[in-house]
Amino acid sequence: MTNPNPFSGGAVGRVVAAPRALAAWALLAYTALFLFFTFFSWLLGPGSFSGRAASAGFRNLFEMALPVLAVILATYIAPVLPGARLMAIIALAEYAVALFFGVITLLIGLGAVLDNVDTAWDSFNALQYLVMGLAALALIAIAAYVTLRAYLALGGRVPTFTPGPGTPPVPPAA
C-alpha cells in the first residue's frame, strides 16, 4: 500500500514538494526586495545624500551571500533544479546591481566620511571605511564569479559583440 503524496496536486503542490526550489526562489526574492528598499532608502531617506550613501547597504555581505547560496542549492546539489539557469541569471542581475551601486555609494560616502576627519582616530575610521568597503565589493565580485561559472556550466552563454556593417576589421594578432 502506498501513501498518497499530499503535495501532488497543482503548481503550488509541486513548489512546496520541492523545498530546495522554494528555498532558492525565496533567497533570490529576499535579495531583490532588499536591493529595492535599499535603493529607495538611499535616494529618499532622511539626512544628507552623502551620509545616506556612506550607510547604504549595497555592500552588506549577509544579503549578498544569499543569491550565490540559492544558485548553489539549485545547481550543485543533484539533481539540478529545472529553473536553475533562470535562478543564475536573476542572481547575476542582483550582483550587477549590488556592485554598481556599491561602488557608487562607496565613493559618494567616502566624501561624507572624509568630511568629518578631525583627529587621527577619524583618519583611521575613514581608512577602515575605504578598505572594508573595497573588501566587501571584492567578496561580492567573487560570489558573482561563482554564480557566473554555475550559469556557464548550465549551458548559459555570455553575449559577444559582433561588429556591424561598416566597422573596420580587426587586424590579426601577431
Image (spheres, grey):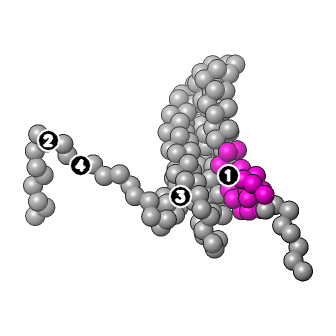
Mark 4 neighbour density, 10 Å: few (under 14) some (14–19) many (20 or more): few
Furthest-front residue in this view: 1
Q: Residue at x 62, y 64 (%)?
A: 81
Circle 2: element type: loop
In the image, what residue type sits under mark 3?
Arg
Is tag 1's residue or tag 3's residue first in the polypeptide sequence?
A: 1
**Sequence-wise, which precedes: disc 3 or disc 4?**
3
Instruction: Give, as a three-letter code, the residue at label 4.
Output: Thr
Q: Which mark is residue 162?
A: 4
Residue 148 makes an appearance in the image: yes
Mark 2 sits on what residue?
165
Q: Neighbour class for label 1 at 10 Å: few (<14), some, many (≥20)?
A: many
Over which residues does the magenta segment extend?
9-30
The quarter holding residue 52 reads top right
Give the crowd class for mark 3: few <14, some 14-19, many >=20 residues within 10 Å: many
Residue 110 drawn at (x, y percent): 55, 32
Lateral position of residue 23 relative to residue 152, left or right: right
Q: Are dots 3 and 4 in contact, CB under 8 Å?
A: no
Residue placed most toward the observer, 119 or 98? 98
Residue 147: where, in percent of width, then height?
A: 53, 58
